[in-house]
Amino acid sequence: MNAPRQILPVTLTKVSLRRGKKMVLKEIDCRFDAVPARTLIIGPNGAGKSLLLRVCHGIVAPDLGQVRWAGETDPRALARSQGMVFQRPVLLRRSTRGNIDLALKIHGLDAAQRRRRVAEALERTGLSRLAGTPARALSFGEQQRLALARAMALRPRVLFLDEPTANLDPAAAHLVEEIVRDMSEAGVKIIMTSHDLNQARRLAQEVIFLHRGRIKERAPADRFFAGPKNDLARAFLNGELLWWRRRSVYDGVGGKSADEMGIDRP
Amino acid sequence: MDEFWRAILTAASMIWEFDAGLWEIIGLSLRVSLTATLIAALIGLPLGALIALGRFPGRRLLIVIFNALMGLPPVVVGLIVYLLLSRAGPFGVFNLLFTPTAMVIAQIILVLPIIISLSREILETLWGEYQEALRSLGAAPGQALVILLWDGRAMLITALLAGFGRAVAEVGAVMIVGGNIDHVTRVMTTSITLEASKGNLSMALGLGIVLLVLSFAISIGAHGFRHISNVRQPV
């Protein structure tokens, strides 16, 4: 229990997810391995990035298709090998220290191990002097660091991060990026969403471009940023507004209908 | 206004002189209502949690029913319990009518919907907030429930207080199933009713003031507990 089991590769087969009447993820096939260590999922708002992450993490079940963690299909079997940091940190009504301690307690660690790991995680995220403060009295940046410290203390094999720096100032965002980089160098697979292209350039080793619930392109970061093959990804990198772009291909391009190209009608 | 001041003086002198009859009534009131609230909490909190976190057919209907039952008229409850416990009723053999036990039973029925509905509401809101994080941490359902109850403790205590308030203040049910028998089933609310109907208004008001003071004392105690539990964070 103390050494999390290996959960890679994470494999998605024909995963679709519906929210209300809308399909938000459409027949996604993909596989995550230990290398490259840092995969960034980028795309405009509403592309389905957060939901894809939750499906990969096993906290949202797909309506169709299957997710496997090292061949295992029950998300709870390997829940303890993976951690997640949410865009809005969810902290319990306890002290800073208590939040990390509780997570470790859930994972079944004894008191001595918990004390050591709590101290270590607080130290690494610069929260040591706030150990006794109620978590919900922390500033937003501190709360996000605590969420990261909590995920880190669990020593996951895979860490999912959902726009972890979206609401942080540059200094706090820098610290988060640095920790994420350190963790990945220590062997933790990072799967992270972002709509900040500069951040993606700094962190990504591999990029997945998601648009309207489909993976439009997946490429090594250097190749992706040098020039994506997909026209929507290119438009996104150029900062164009994608719904304007869509109108030009809406009725089909090069003999393909819009549906074949995976473009939704409004 | 004269009446009012005389009532306060009467109340003060009764408390000051440590009137044995008065303390007997206060004691029984507290015993009956606290027991009823405690038992209702033991049944109602798990049920509230079950409805809040569970997903089963009829759940919505159950929520609507318990919400509606919060407004249950005490006299009606008294009447139903009376019929059930009377000699001709199904539970007549237990000889419970006109005993404090009968009063506790009636008050449990009154308090239960309040505790179920409020705790469901509280736990459901908290669960909505914690759900993803707890699932992400790999918490088992039992662990999640303990965490929810602990983190919601301050709000849950308020729900219990609301239940106790209803129990200690109602007169309809205890009057019918208890019968307001001196030294046996006479509680504060029934004696206020009795004194008022005898025209002994200052005595009735005096008792009313004692009841108010009691309510305040309990509420202050609970607030103190909340304050302590909020300030002293568990390690």
Image (cartoon, coloured by chain):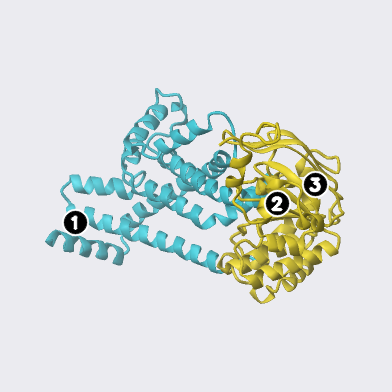
Q: Is residue B106 left or right of residue B55?
A: left
User: Residue at position x 46%, y 27% from top?
Assistant: B93
Where is residue B200 shown, x and y percent of the image? 17, 51
> How much space separates mark 3 and mark 1, taking CA atoms?
70 Å
- In the rendered structure, which amino acid carries the disc numbered 1? Ser
User: From the viewer's perspective, is B198 left or right of B95?
Assistant: left
The disc placed on residue A78 is 3
- Depth check: B163 or A256 in front? A256
Q: Which residue is mark 2?
A: A234
Indicate the colour of chain A: yellow
Looking at this view, is B46 or A213 the one in front? A213
Q: What amino acid is found at the position of numbered circle 3 in the picture?
A: Leu
Per the image, the residue denoted by label 1 is B202
The residue that appears at 20% across and 48% down in the rendered structure is B196
Point out the residue furthest to the front here: A254
Residue B215 in view? yes
Q: Chain of mark 3?
A: A
The answer to which of marks 2 and 3 sits earlier in the sequence is: 3
